[in-house]
């Protein structure tokens, strides 16, 4: 089993890199991939850089070049569901691209021909997250994640995303990673910890909480890796 562990930003994978052994750094396609051992498991760890394009490139590389059998994503997100607070964990059961729009031709938001609005994450990995959550005594919200190439910091855009996609959280990489994994038939799991509420305070809250929330997500993810 070879596990791809991915984030979008250095802060999101730093808590993981520090726990690896025999790290071999591979430079490829203007990015750095860390081949390593976590306990006795083969892992490849990388942060993609922000947004759907960079995360597509990294996810595709993890699967096609490093031949990973499963892809786990860890990072932070903006809350859409008002029940979610800073530091809360969200597991994606399905993901959509909120800024994919050819609605002028009568298609739904997030849809293009031969595509689908939502892509579903791996049910076994979701089930595993529930076991780990109960063991750790933490709450994990399973929900819909909306992805787009914008940092959302306005109630108006957040409400559009909430109404159109019934999203629980939003970010900038999950749905593109989902498309890659789905197309290549590789199980994937997208985990996020809330860093802000995608409102007018989002920028400040993100800056303040990205590091602590990224740690919450990374630590939970590694508990799942222990159980794989
Ligand atoms: C230098 C600034 C980098 C922001 C990257 C934010 N990530 C993108 O995946 C997660 C995220 C946290 N809060 C968000 C929000 N309100 N809108 C979009 N994305 C997010």
Image (cartoon, rainbow, N blue to C red):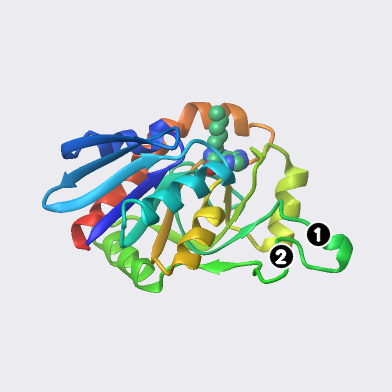
Quadrant assignment, res 163: bottom right
Tell me if 219 is positioned left or right of 187 in this view: left
> Dividing the picture into quarters, in which one does residue 214 lie?
top left
Residue 38 visible in the picture = yes
In the picture provided, is 132 more to the left or to the right than 83?
Answer: left
For the image, the number of numbered tags is 2
Query: At x 19% / y 56%, what residue is drawn?
Result: 226
For the residue pair 59 and 175, the one nearer the viewer reads as: 59
Q: Say whether disc 1 or disc 2 marks the residue closer to the N-terminus.
A: 1
In this rendering, would 160 be left or right of 29? Answer: right
**Residue 51: image x %, image y %?**
57, 41
- Where residue 67 appears, as percent x and y from the top left, is 31, 57
Q: Which mark is residue 102?
A: 1
* Residue under label 2: 111
Query: Crowdedness of circle 1 by 10 Å Cα count: few (<14), some, many (20+)?
Result: some
Q: Between marks 1 and 2, how big is the CA–CA gap?
A: 7 Å
Residues at badges 1 and 2 in contact (C-beta under 8 Å)?
A: yes
**Is 98 on the left-hand or right-hand side of 64?**
right
Q: Check the picture and name the quadrant holding the C terminus.
A: bottom left
* Residue displayed at 67% across by 71% down: 114
């Amino acid at each position: 089993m070879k596990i791809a562990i991915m984030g979008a930003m250095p802060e999101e994978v730093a808590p993981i890199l520090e726990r690896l052994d025999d790290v071999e750094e591979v430079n490829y396609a203007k990015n750095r991939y860390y081949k390593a051992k976590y306990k006795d498991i083969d892992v490849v760890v990388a942060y993609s850089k922000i947004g759907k394009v960079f995360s597509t490139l990294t996810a595709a590389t993890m699967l096609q070049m490093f031949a990973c059998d499963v892809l786990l994503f860890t990072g932070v997100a903006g809350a859409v569901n008002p029940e979610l607070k800073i530091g809360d964990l969200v597991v994606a059961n399905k993901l959509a691209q909120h800024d994919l729009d050819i609605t002028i031709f009568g298609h739904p938001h997030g849809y293009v021909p031969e595509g689908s609005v939502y892509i579903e994450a791996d049910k076994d990995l979701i089930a595993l997250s529930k076991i780990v959550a109960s063991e750790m005594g933490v709450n994990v919200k399973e929900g819909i994640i909306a992805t787009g190439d914008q940092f959302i910091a306005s109630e108006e855009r957040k409400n559009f995303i909430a109404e159109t996609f019934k999203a629980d959280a939003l970010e900038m990489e999950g749905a593109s990673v989902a498309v890659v994994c789905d197309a290549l038939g590789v199980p994937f799991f997208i985990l996020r910890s809330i860093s802000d509420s995608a409102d007018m305070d989002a920028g400040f809250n993100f800056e303040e909480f990205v590091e602590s929330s990224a740690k919450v997500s990374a630590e939970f993810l590694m508990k799942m890796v222990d159980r794989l």
